[in-house]
Image: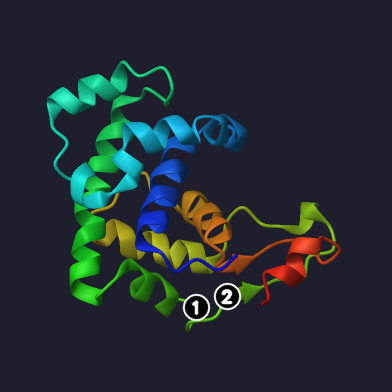
Amino acid sequence: MPLHDDIRFFELLCLEGAQAGLSWLTVLRKRDAYRKAYENFDPQKVVHYGEEKILELLSNPGIIRNRRKIESSIRNAACFLQICEQKGSFDSYVWEFVDGSPVVNRWKESSEIPAVTSLAETISKDLKVRGFNFIGPTIVYAFLQSSGLVNDHIVSCFRHNECLK
């Protein structure tokens, strides 16, 4: 469903980055542990995480214990907050890329759904210029799908039409 909540956007960015190289199911199973470990993905809190918190997260078996991914989530919190300050919200920033309306694809088979699009490449490039990392076009496309900026449900899926509302 189309998302308009900055905290949820930050959560999805963190989870998509953590998922890099792993299955999405692995991350989904750890989502509750991530919410607890990351204080419900409040970027105002995450941005202040230092070495002590990083070590705590690295010892947490409920999340993916990869130092680079953890450090990336902290760095990305600072970049996320800069966008919020510049644009008023991350919501305003990200929806500009699709002129305020979700991209609605009409795939008949899941095999038609791409892993990357030019939109994802454009947003990835812009986020990297703004200092984000673990934010390549494949991660961005998954983020666009999970946040409802892109509707990639196949047309026979009941969610395809629900996401149009």
Q: Secondary structure at mark 1?
A: loop
Residue occupied by mark 1? 98
Q: Please, what is the three-letter code of the amino acid marked with disc 2?
A: Pro
Looking at the rendered structure, the kind of residue marked 1 is Val
Q: Horizontal and vertical percent for residue 164?
A: 68, 75
Is residue 20 among what the camera can see?
A: no
Quarter of the view holding residue 52: top left
The quarter in which the C terminus is drawn is bottom right
Looking at the image, residue 44 sits to the left or right of residue 128; the answer is left
The one nearer the camera, 60 or 19, is 60
Label 1: how many Cα within 10 Å (few below 14, some 14–19, many 20+): few
Q: Residue at x 79, y 52 (%)?
A: 111
40 and 59: which is toward the camera: 40
Name the residue at 86% across, 63% down: 156
Secondary element under disc 2, as helix, strand or loop, is loop
Whether residue 148 is visible to the viewer of this picture, yes or no, is yes
Image quadrant containing the N terminus: bottom right
Counting from the top left corner in percent of width and height, residue 87 is at 25, 75
The x, y position of residue 18, in whole percent, is 43, 36
Q: Which residue is mark 2?
A: 102
| Residue at image coords 39%, 38% | 35
